[in-house]
């Protein structure tokens, strides 16, 4: 399917591309994925929360569940006292992270111009 048709399909509520982009583009999803990526090892909930200090426990829990439901994160619970739960990127998520890193790189390259444009727009 050519790109033009894919973009046109985004206008339909049941479009699979729109569905995936909406989930990945959620407020916290990219940050959680990019937090798990460089660790290249399972991380505990508190470690992830410490790396994203402005995320609430409720939102981190919801984001991790959503990412797990999409097959991007695995959750492993250990029957220990105290309980231990670890999260790790799946293979699917590892194929996504280079694209996320490219987006981060683009944002870093353009952030100054974007901020300048925002200020100019607000001062119209």
Image (cartoon, rainbow, N blue to C red):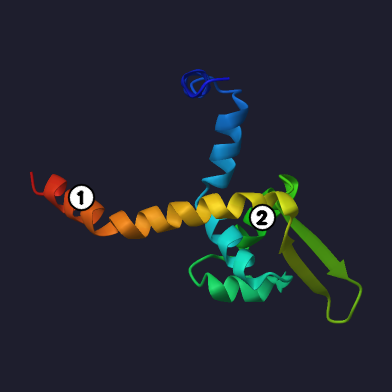
Percent coordinates x, y for residue 59 in the rendering: 59, 58
Asked if the residue at tag 2 contacts the one at tag 1, i.e. Cβ–Cβ closer than 8 Å, the answer is: no
Residue at the image position 53 percent from the left and 49 percent from the top:
99
Residue at the image position 71 percent from the left and 49 percent from the top:
92
Residue found at the very far right of the displayed protein: 79
Q: Could you tell me which secondary element the residue under label 1 belongs to? A: helix
Percent coordinates x, y for residue 55 in the rendering: 53, 65
Dot 1 or dot 2, earlier in sequence:
2
Query: How busy is the neighbourhood of tag 2: few (under 14 within 10 Å), some, or many (20 plus)?
Result: some
Q: Which mark is residue 94?
A: 2
Q: Is residue 43 above or below residue 75?
A: below
Residue found at the very far bottom of the displayed protein: 81
Percent coordinates x, y for residue 57 in the rendering: 61, 66
Q: Quadrant of the C terminus?
A: top left
Residue at the image position 92 percent from the left and 73 percent from the top:
79
Residue 72 in the figure: left or right of residue 12: right
Residue named by callout 1:
118
Q: Is residue 16 above or below residue 70?
A: above
Q: Quadrant of the N terminus?
A: top right
- Taking depth in this image into account, of 46 and 109 the one nearest to the observer is 109
How many numbered circles are shown?
2
Image-quadrant location for residue 44: bottom right
């Amino acid at each position: 399917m050519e790109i033009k048709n894919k973009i046109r399909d985004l206008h339909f509520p049941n479009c699979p591309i729109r569905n995936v982009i909406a989930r990945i583009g959620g407020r916290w999803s990219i940050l959680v994925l990019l937090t798990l990526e460089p660790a290249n090892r399972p991380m505990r909930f508190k470690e992830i929360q410490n790396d994203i200090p402005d995320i609430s426990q409720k939102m981190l829990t919801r984001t991790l569940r959503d990412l797990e439901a999409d097959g991007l994160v695995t959750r492993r619970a250990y029957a220990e006292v105290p309980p231990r739960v670890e999260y790790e990127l799946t293979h699917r998520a590892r194929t996504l992270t280079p694209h996320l890193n490219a987006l981060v790189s683009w944002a870093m390259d353009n952030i100054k111009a974007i901020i300048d444009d925002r200020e100019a727009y607000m001062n119209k």
